[in-house]
Amino acid sequence: MKKRVAIIGVGGRTGTMLSFELAKSSDVLGVARRDTMDFLKENELFIDRGNGPVLFKERMIEDTEFSENNYQNIIFLTNKNPISATLKYYYQKCGLEKPIFVLMQNGIDAINSAEKTLKEIAEPKDIKVVRMVLFNAIDRRENCLKYSTPIKVALAQALGDKGIDDVYSLLKASGFRVNKFSKKDARNLEFSKLFLNLIGMSSASRGLSISKGFQDKEVFREEIGALKEYVEIVRAAGGRFISFPSYPINFFVLFLSLPMFIIFIFRNKLSSVISKGRGNKPKDLDEIDYYNGAVVSLAKKNELEKEEKLNKIDSPSLDSNIRKGASKRAFINQKIYWRVLEIFKKF
């Protein structure tokens, strides 16, 4: 029997792609906000997987209609950060038998947010949370989503002890290429994906594509500096990096240890490889809080925890200190973060 799957956030790029792809092997219910539903009633949406556009016509309901009567085995949360309110809403809407929740947000906050949220409302035996990261770039041009196949993802059990095998089987049956990691690497999965997300943010903060940004020596130096900072901050937090097929992150981390004049020699090659992998899709700035902002937050958290240990006293709440003032360890990422915030102030 087909698994019943809900996709929260259909109308957005990731949610729409998942709804379309998973319909091959499961009973899919798309869930969208009212404004998205209204838009789709008046406009057609198309999917282009590289062989021409196909009309998107999967089953959908409005988020306010979701109830325990819409029983699901697995719920994919594809909405953007933050996720606490969304997770709480759908968890409480479900009946006694709780589904598996799959977190697909960018950044390194999803697992921590889910853990805090579910600690308040859930019985430990009912918690089944899987972390999933997506590697395919999804471009949206007017009413058409374009992406390449196969869909490449990585999974790790994030909270609880059950769920990952069911999600893995579902994705494989839909033709996804899936890499599965142990629960102990769930946070490292987030750290590693953010490494990829950070590439090109310095260029994007200046309105440049990756190819043009890498041609500018100052911008390229800032790109590399931001990544070097991030590597050190993750290590200080006790994290490590994971390589994926087609994404040898540990090789790139080792490459960053080379002298800058050697790294410069390879900037054109790097630009070509990265731009090709993204399909020339421009970088998004709207989640800057969860990209370079997240690096700054992690650096400050490390600094505050270190200060606590040295002074052996309780410091103020870590959360209340995040993003206040400057970080000593994330100077370059903070520059990029503040630059993007200035862009948003103009609108």
Image: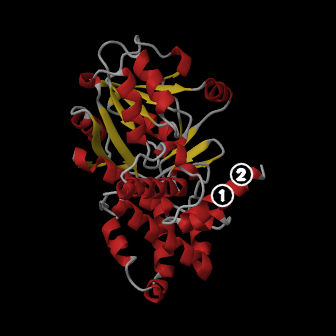
Residue at the spot x=41%, y=29% of the render?
Answer: 117
Total count of labels:
2
Q: Residue at x 52, y 14 (%)?
A: 65
Residue at (36, 71) in percent of width and height = 253
Q: Are marks 2 and 1 in contact (CB under 8 Å)?
A: yes
**Local SS, label 1:** helix
| Structural crowding at the residue carrying mark 2, measured as other residues with C-alpha within 10 Å and reported as few (<14), some (14–19) or many (≥20) | few
Name the colouring of the figure. Answer: secondary structure
Q: Quarter holding the N terminus?
A: top left
Q: Which residue is mark 2?
A: 344
- Residue 84 shown left or right of residue 142 in the figure: left
Q: Secondary structure at mark 2?
A: helix
Rendering coords of residue 189 (x, y %) = 33, 52
Mark 2 residue type: Phe
Q: Nearer the viewer, residue 210 or 347?
A: 347
Coordinates of residue 197 in the picture (x, y in percent): 48, 58
Which mark, by number, is residue 340? 1
Q: Is 345 situated above or below 30?
A: below
Identify the amino acid type marked 1.
Answer: Val
326 w.r.t. 151: above or below = below
Observer able to see residue 200 = no
Quadrant in which residue 165 is drawn: top left
Q: x and y percent of residue 120 in the render?
A: 39, 24
